[in-house]
């Protein structure tokens, strides 16, 4: 300012003062009660402005924040540091005009340690009638759901109170943002509010982060990147705006567009800039108002209307650090600041500054004590509080404005709010509705926020509901009404079952309308039909309606029907999924069962399958063995099943393992059975003791290795075994066929084709026969097993070889292997044949045999019909007797005899002496060097004592036994009479005591033992065996000493077709409560019945019932439609015609 200007100003001032003095001395009209004029009043000196002393709320606090609700109640928070421990967030509820806290809460995050520090101070906000307290803690390491280690040391906690601050929930972790600026709730919809926080001074610039109901927010919108500080936030018309400034003299405001993700800076408008320092922002009547200090050195405090840019000075004094604008709904603004007005320092306030026009009046001093940091808030009537901290850590309170009650309810006390029901509990991130329904946020991340409607909690973030993951679509709310106990959504949500490492199972997608009122264990919380949504359970489509039942306190059980791969027909798997809020989907509950899967004549029973995330062994309760399991690959379904062979219900079952996977569905089914005899009884007399291979479902068949054993005389010993590779074709009848080796009594009978059918037939076609002693059957032999009769017989004609130093093979032998032993017989009279060793020729025997259990074969020189070799009564050698040079046998005259002489070290060299003492040349001789036996035959022996004497140098005799020729059995007059399935076999037989005749029935299906003949003439009834109709032969087996010596076809007849399976009749369905009662008349000739129940939108139930069953009850049908079918099943697995009936759905009332 120039000297000339100063002189001009001084002159002007003097003129004004002189004019004032002259006017005081002039006559001045006086207005008085009596009209008289007295002396003028003299000027007096005024005192400096003053204010009441503040109230001390704490002696160890810092960084306070305050919110004043509609009732005038102040909700104050600050931090109290603790040496060696976590900082404490202190909450104070202070009613209007009170001098002390009515309620004090000391809030500490669970698990906090000495590194849990709040250096910026907490923030308090109102979300409808809910008190929200936020505290940012650093640097204690708290792992977050993001998995980013960089987020671990920044933790934003939120506590909430629904009763005006009297009680608080445990905190939820809602983000990682800092709180250096402030926290304000925002949102265009009062039922869908979020809490926004903004940074003060943070590396990288100004960051805004919004926490929605239940959300954990790891990201923030960077509104100003670089050297920008002191972010402040307000909300106008539900939309947040943030003010900040650079390190110079320019301030900025950015406002969200109201569209898109508020945490994305691209959804915010461009910044509005203006000259000013330290901007603070508020909303008054929906208009943004900003205070700032005018740059240029004056430091005047301005109030700026952001829409018009107009700025008005509200203080020309010295303004310190700390300005709080408070906007009112009527458009006026109150401003509180720290500084000096004139010579007085303190906290000043201008109340109710109008939106336009001059700023009139003088500021009011509300506190003479200046702290470090101040905060203030007021109600619409202007009454409020100022809270500040000091250097010595006092928290000071000063009230301003009217102390008169507003007459309005404050937070947590809106009309009609009242107390919550006794069985409803609310925490920040957890709600319990009654004994059985619980909603929470996973890992304590997030808090439920209040809606405008009292008692309603809101979440836009995913939440867990009794183990179900509820994920709202963007912008969709989940609303939980605490009093009505309902859970609703404003739009589409997805309901997932989740477990670590398992793909999400989408159970439902749509809108929620759940009612938890009065729901307890086992109650249905939700139901949706198959037409509404079709979930998929890790590769298995879920079919039918789904009921979600409650399993207190925080779980559900969800019975489902699974659609199995098409190879399983119409049978569905039955599973119960288990989930809870502690574990989500319980992986051990991922199990399903199925029963009654028809695979031709066989039935897949007791299938029990589990999901294995990391592979391993699954469990099962297969019938044989008693407990077994299956090996699963990672992320695979695996389990066990029983393949039940015909006849149904009573047939044998073989355990197997089965595997499923996505996306290929059925992967494999395998068997591994190794059991001691009798193992798995396939049919009476026939047992499976080993099976290893796979089950093919389309077409159904079993492929693998096998061992089948035939019952013997002893209980735990088998007479014969079949072992090899097997293909079981599950056709009608069941057919097991393959390549195998047939063994009896430890002797390999042969290798070839094996065929076993479920109607009781088994046939063998072996490439060659067995070896016994020096004999080997080289011809192809075939035969049968009659397991129920405990008999088998394999026979053939062709070449038999003998080991006579070199192999000598002769054609024309008939060979028979039976359940008693082996016999070979040559029909032609033997003649000498050359051999390459001494004596260079040999006359082969007529036949030979071996009874199972014997060690030495029997050789028949004269005839195949001969008695068993027996040691004669005289000079009978004991087993422990010493060898002798000669032995004798007393014979009667008559049939030919064969002597068998066994030596001590080799076949003895002997001479045969007749009863008269003369040496006799045998009619035939034969040496079996392996058995050390020499055979000598005499066609017409004289009566008396015969002697066998060794020659010089011969091995001594250890045994002498003899066999006498026999007359073959006779069979004549065989014929079959009768009709249909009632037949009579007439015959006439003759045979000796050591002989027998057995009749066989042989047809296209196989051979079975029909009967053992009685001597003489007889007529005996029989029923044709199972299998297709057509011509069948009656075969007579002529048996000598238990060995089959000959087979003859003696008659034929035409068998009828198998009896048709009858069809069920009078099928009826009626309702009884929630069950369906089914009755019918069974069809004829069935061995079992299959009942199939289909419920549209419900389960498919398959039951295998007894042949004469005529009634069944199916629970859980309620009023739904039901279709029932009944099918007769024959003993061989054949299925008859199906009869069906449908019961319509019950009418709704």
Image (tube, rainbow, N blue to C red):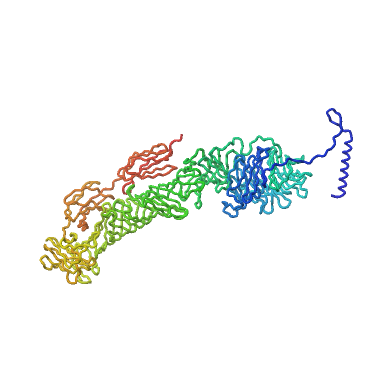
Comparing 395 with 1108, the one in front is 395
Residue 227: x, y in percent?
A: 69, 53
Left-right relation of 288 to 193: right
In front of the other: 247 or 80: 80
Q: Quadrant of residue 783?
A: bottom left
Q: Residue furthest top?
A: 34
Instruction: Describe residue 301's horizontal placement relative to residue 415 as left or right.
Output: right
**Disc count in the image?**
0
Q: Is residue 585 left or right of residue 134?
A: left
Q: Where does residue 755 sit, x and y in percent of width and height?
A: 31, 55
The part of the image, by quadrant, that contains residue 398 is: top right
In the rendered view, tell whether residue 585 sits above or below residue 409.
below
**Is residue 876 found left or right of 743 in the rendered image?**
left
Residue 631 at x, y = what percent? Answer: 42, 55
Residue 287 makes an appearance in the image: no
The residue lying toward the viewer, choosing from 627 and 692, is: 627
Residue 21 % position (x, y): 88, 38
Instruction: Identify the residue at the far left of this view.
Output: 916
Q: Nearer the viewer, residue 891 or 690?
A: 891
Task: Answer whether residue 695 is visible to the viewer in this image.
Answer: yes
């Amino acid at each position: 300012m120039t000297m000339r200007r100063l002189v001009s100003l001084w002159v002007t001032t003097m003129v004004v003062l002189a004019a004032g003095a002259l006017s005081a001395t002039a006559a001045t009209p006086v207005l008085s009660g009596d009209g008289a004029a007295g002396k003028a009043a003299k000027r007096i000196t005024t005192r400096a402005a003053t204010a009441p002393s503040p109230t001390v709320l704490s002696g160890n606090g810092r960084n306070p924040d305050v919110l004043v609700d509609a009732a005038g109640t102040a909700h104050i928070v600050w931090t109290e540091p603790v040496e060696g421990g976590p900082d404490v967030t202190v909450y104070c509820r202070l009613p209007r005009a009170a001098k002390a806290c009515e309620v004090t809460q000391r809030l500490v995050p669970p698990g906090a340690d000495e590194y849990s520090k709040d250096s910026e101070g907490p923030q308090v906000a109102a979300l409808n009638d809910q008190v929200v307290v936020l505290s940012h803690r650093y640097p204690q390491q708290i792992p977050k759901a993001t998995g980013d280690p960089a987020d671990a040391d920044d933790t934003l906690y939120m506590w909430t109170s629904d009763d005006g601050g009297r009680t608080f929930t445990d905190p939820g972790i809602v983000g990682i943002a800092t709180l250096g600026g402030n926290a304000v709730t925002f949102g265009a919809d009062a039922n869908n509010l979020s809490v926004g926080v903004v940074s003060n001074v943070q590396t990288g610039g100004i960051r805004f982060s919004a926490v929605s109901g239940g959300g954990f927010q790891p990201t923030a919108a960077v509104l100003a990147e670089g050297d920008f500080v002191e972010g402040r936030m307000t909300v106008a018309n539900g939309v947040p705006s943030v003010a900040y400034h650079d390190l110079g003299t320019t301030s900025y405001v950015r406002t969200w567009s109201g569209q898109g993700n508020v945490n994305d800076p691209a959804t915010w408008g461009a910044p509005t800039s203006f000259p000013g320092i330290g901007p603070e922002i508020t909303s008054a009547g929906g208009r943004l108002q900003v205070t700032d200090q005018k740059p240029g050195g004056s430091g005047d405090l301005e109030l700026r209307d952001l829409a018009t840019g107009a700025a008005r000075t509200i203080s020309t004094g010295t303004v310190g650090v700390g300005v709080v604008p408070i906007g009112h709904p009527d458009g006026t603004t109150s401003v509180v600041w720290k500084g000096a007005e004139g010579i007085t320092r303190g906290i000043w306030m201008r109340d109710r500054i109008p939106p336009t026009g001059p700023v009139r009046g003088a500021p009011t001093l509300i506190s003479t004590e200046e702290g470090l940091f101040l905060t203030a808030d007021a109600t619409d009537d202007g009454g409020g509080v100022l809270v500040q901290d000091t250097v010595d850590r006092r928290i000071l309170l000063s009230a301003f404005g009217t102390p008169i009650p507003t007459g309005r309810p404050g937070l947590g006390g809106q009309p009609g709010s009242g107390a919550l029901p006794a069985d409803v509990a609310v925490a920040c991130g957890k709600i319990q509705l009654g004994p059985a329904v619980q909603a929470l946020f996973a890992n304590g991340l997030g808090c439920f926020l209040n809606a405008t409607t009292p008692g309603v909690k809101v979440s836009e973030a995913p939440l867990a509901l009794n183990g179900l993951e509820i994920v709202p679509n963007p912008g969709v709310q989940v609303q939980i009404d605490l009093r009505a106990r309902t859970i609703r959504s404003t739009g589409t949500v997805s309901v997932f079952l989740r477990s670590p490492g398992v793909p999400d199972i989408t159970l439902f997608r749509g809108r929620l309308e759940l009612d938890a009122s009065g729901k307890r264990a086992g109650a249905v919380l939700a139901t949706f039909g198959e037409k509404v949504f079709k979930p998929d359970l890790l590769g298995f489509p879920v079919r039918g309606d789904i009921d979600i039942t409650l399993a207190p306190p925080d779980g559900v059980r969800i019975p489902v029907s699974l659609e199995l791969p098409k190879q399983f027909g119409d049978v569905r798997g039955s599973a119960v999924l288990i989930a809870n809020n502690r574990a989500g989907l319980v992986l051990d509950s991922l199990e399903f069962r199925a029963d009654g899967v028809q695979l031709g004549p066989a039935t897949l029973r007791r299938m029990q399958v589990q999901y294995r995330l990391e592979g391993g062994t699954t469990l099962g309760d297969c019938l044989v063995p008693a407990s077994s399991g299956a090996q699963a690959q990672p992320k695979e379904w695996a389990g066990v099943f029983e393949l039940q062979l015909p006849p149904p219900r009573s047939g044998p079952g073989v355990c197997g393992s089965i595997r499923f996977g996505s996306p290929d569905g059925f992967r494999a089914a395998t068997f591994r059975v190794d059991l001691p005899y009798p193992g798995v009884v396939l049919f009476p007399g026939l047992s499976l003791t080993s099976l290893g291979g796979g089950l093919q479902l389309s077409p159904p068949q079993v492929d693998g290795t096998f061992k089948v054993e035939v019952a013997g005389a002893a209980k735990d010993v088998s007479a014969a075994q079949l072992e090899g590779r097997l293909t079981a074709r599950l056709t009608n009848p069941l057919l097991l066929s393959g390549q195998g080796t047939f063994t009896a009594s430890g002797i390999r009978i042969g290798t070839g084709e094996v065929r076993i059918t479920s109607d009781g037939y088994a046939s063998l076609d072996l490439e060659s026969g067995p070896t016994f002693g020096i004999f080997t059957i080289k011809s192809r032999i075939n035969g049968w097993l009659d397991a129920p009769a405990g008999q088998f017989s394999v026979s053939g004609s062709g070449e038999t070889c003998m080991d006579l130093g070199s192999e000598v093979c002769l054609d024309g032998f008939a060979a028979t292997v039976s359940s008693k032993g082996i016999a070979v017989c040559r029909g032609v009279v033997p003649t000498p044949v050359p051999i390459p060793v001494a004596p260079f020729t040999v006359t082969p025997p007529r036949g030979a045999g071996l009874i199972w259990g014997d060690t030495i074969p029997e050789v028949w020189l004269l005839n195949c019909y001969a008695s068993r070799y027996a040691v004669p009564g005289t000079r009978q050698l004991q087993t422990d007797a010493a060898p002798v040079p000669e032995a004798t046998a007393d014979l009667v005259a008559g049939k030919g005899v064969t002597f068998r002489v066994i030596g001590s070290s080799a076949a003895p060299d002997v001479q045969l002496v007749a009863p008269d003492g003369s040496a006799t040349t045998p009619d035939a001789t034969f040496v079996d060097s392996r058995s050390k036996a020499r055979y000598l035959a005499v066609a017409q022996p004289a009566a008396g004592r015969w002697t066998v004497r060794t020659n010089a140098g011969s091995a001594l005799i250890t045994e002498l036994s003899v066999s006498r020729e026999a007359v073959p059995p006779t069979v004549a007059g065989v014929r079959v009479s009768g009709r249909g399935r009632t037949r009579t076999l007439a015959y006439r037989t003759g045979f000796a005591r050591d002989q027998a005749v057995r009749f066989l029935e042989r047809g296209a299906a196989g051979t079975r033992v029909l009967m053992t003949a009685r001597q003489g003439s007889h007529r005996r009834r029989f029923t044709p065996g199972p299998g297709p109709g057509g011509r069948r032969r009656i075969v007579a087996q002529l048996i000598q000493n238990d060995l089959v010596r000959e087979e003859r076809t003696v008659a034929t007849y035409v068998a009828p077709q198998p009896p048709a399976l009858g069809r069920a009749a009078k099928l009826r369905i009626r309702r009884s409560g929630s069950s369906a009662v089914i009755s019918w008349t069974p069809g004829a000739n069935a061995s079992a019945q299959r009942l199939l129940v289909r419920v549209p939108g419900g389960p498919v139930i398959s039951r295998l019932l007894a042949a004469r069953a005529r009634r069944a009850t199916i629970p859980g049908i309620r009023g739904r439609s039901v279709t029932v079918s009944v099918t007769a099943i024959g003993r061989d697995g054949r299925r008859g015609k199906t009869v069906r009936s449908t019961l319509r759905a019950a009418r709704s009332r």
